[in-house]
Amino acid sequence: MIDFARVQKELQECSRDVEASGIKVAPKSDNLGRLTGTIPGPVGTPYEGGTFQIDITLPDGYPFEPPKMQFATKV
């Protein structure tokens, strides 16, 4: 079973670090098991200046099982 208290805590930690990392993560809807994230393209690469959206699904065994992530933005 997903530890929703942990997910909320991790989302708060991510929101504090947005300025430094440029990475944003937020719930996709009311369900904390489905998240959406955006990451900036790395500096010095052909992806620099781009913003890439990722769909994130937390399995029932989270945090003991890793999240499943898939680019929503065509790369």
Image: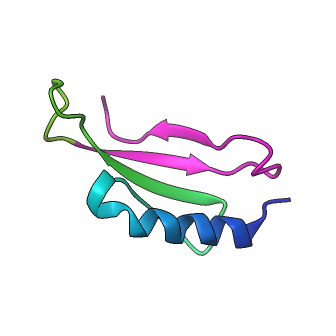
Residue 45 falls left or right of residue 14: left
1 w.r.t. 47: above or below: below
Residue 27 in sight from this viewpoint = no
Q: Quadrant of the image for the C terminus? A: top left
Residue 43 falls left or right of residue 24: left
The colouring scheme, among rainbow, by chain, secondary structure or one colour, is rainbow
- Residue nearest the observer in this picture, 18 or 34: 18
Q: Residue furthest right?
A: 1
- Residue nearest the observer in this picture, 65 or 33: 65
The stretch in magenta equals 51-75
69 w.r.t. 27: above or below: above
Q: Is residue 68 magenta?
A: yes
Q: Is residue 44 magenta?
A: no
Q: How many marks?
A: 0
Q: Residue 74: x, y in percent?
A: 31, 33
Residue lying at 53% horizontally and 66% vertically, measured from the top left: 11
Q: Quadrant of the image for the N terminus? A: bottom right
Residue 74 in sight from this viewpoint = yes
Residue lying at 43% horizontally and 45% vertically, measured from the top left: 54
Q: Residue 63: x, y in percent?
A: 75, 51
